[in-house]
Image: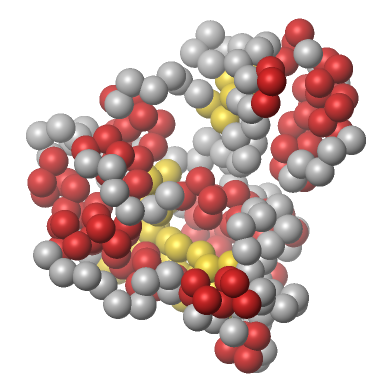
């Protein structure tokens, strides 16, 4: 059975290309989804934490003043991620943010296609609810310290256990079958292999690379070179711009 690593991040904001991690939690899981290891820490982002972000997760500049920067954790986190299927709730944001921070620290980062079990994708398939509501449904109670990394990570694991317990007859038997792309396929979504963490580009079932946003959503990128050149002059994330540059070299 593949190794599982549940995780959650708290950040200075919602811009995955420019905002910084202020706290992380990674929980290694055994075959029964029980926690077998924990790696958690506050992180000094090197920039002030906006008040609106502090209102959400409660982490202040003073809290992280003595914490190590993310670069001090990057090598260990990269090694952890490389070995595992990730587990997260609404993991698209966390994957993109983690990738940006890892690359900023000189690591290779995470592929947009790295296996991810996203409890939000599963919940949308079987129920469609937020993490707090999903946790209450499966655990029969609310949980404290929402929007702190460890509390959210443990809640995500509890939701995954509950989803397998309650909806096991509708879900794949293998953990590999629970990754977001497989669940989206079960839910009837179009196959999309994303090329960047912001999901601006995807490869369809026939191998054609298409835009996933704007006026040319769904168009073959090969037919829109001018649009790719326009993107280079706009403020897209480095991850997306690297894909644009690769496509223009074709």
Reply above or below: 183 against 135.
above
- In the rendered image, residue 96, in percent from the top left (x then y), is placed at 60, 49
Reply above or below: 18 against 68.
above
- Residue shown at the point (76%, 8%) measured from the top left: 223
- Which one is in front, 11 or 157? 11
Q: How many numbered marks appear?
A: 0
Q: Is residue 37 left or right of residue 106?
A: left
- In the rendered image, residue 224, in percent from the top left (x then y), is placed at 78, 13
Quadrant position of residue 230: top right
Specify whether residue 215 is in view: yes
Q: Is residue 122 left or right of residue 210?
A: left
- In the rendered image, residue 152, in percent from the top left (x then y), is placed at 37, 66
| Quarter of the image where the C terminus is located | top right
- Residue shown at the point (86%, 17%) measured from the top left: 226
Reply above or below: 54 against 243.
below
- Residue shown at the point (58%, 89%) measured from the top left: 63
Specify whether residue 69 is in view: no
- In the rendered image, residue 64, in percent from the top left (x then y), is placed at 62, 85
- Which one is in front, 219 or 206? 219
| Quarter of the image where the N terminus is located | top left
Q: Is residue 176 left or right of residue 39?
A: left
Q: Is residue 183 left or right of residue 65?
A: left
């Amino acid at each position: 059975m593949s190794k599982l690593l549940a995780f959650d991040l708290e950040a200075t904001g919602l811009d995955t290309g420019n905002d910084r991690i202020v706290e992380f939690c990674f929980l290694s899981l055994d075959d029964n989804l029980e926690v077998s290891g924990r790696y958690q820490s506050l992180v000094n982002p090197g920039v002030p934490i906006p008040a609106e972000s502090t209102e959400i997760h409660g982490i202040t500049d003073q809290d992280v003043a003595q914490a190590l920067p993310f670069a001090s954790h990057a090598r260990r986190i990269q090694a952890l991620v490389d070995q595992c299927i990730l587990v997260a709730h609404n993991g698209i944001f966390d994957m993109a943010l983690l990738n940006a921070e890892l690359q900023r620290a000189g690591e290779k980062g995470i592929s947009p296609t790295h296996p991810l079990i996203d409890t939000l994708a599963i919940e949308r398939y079987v129920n469609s609810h937020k993490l707090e509501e999903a946790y209450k449904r499966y655990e029969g109670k609310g949980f404290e310290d929402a929007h702190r990394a460890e509390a959210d990570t443990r809640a995500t694991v509890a939701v995954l256990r509950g989803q397998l317990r309650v909806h096991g007859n509708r879900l794949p038997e293998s953990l590999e079958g629970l990754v977001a792309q497989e669940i989206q396929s079960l839910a009837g979504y179009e196959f999309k292999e994303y090329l960047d963490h912001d999901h601006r580009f995807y490869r369809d079932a026939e191998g054609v690379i298409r835009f996933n946003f704007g006026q040319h959503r769904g168009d073959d990128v090969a037919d829109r070179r001018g649009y790719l050149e326009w993107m280079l002059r706009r403020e897209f994330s480095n991850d997306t711009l690297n894909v644009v540059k690769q496509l223009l070299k074709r």
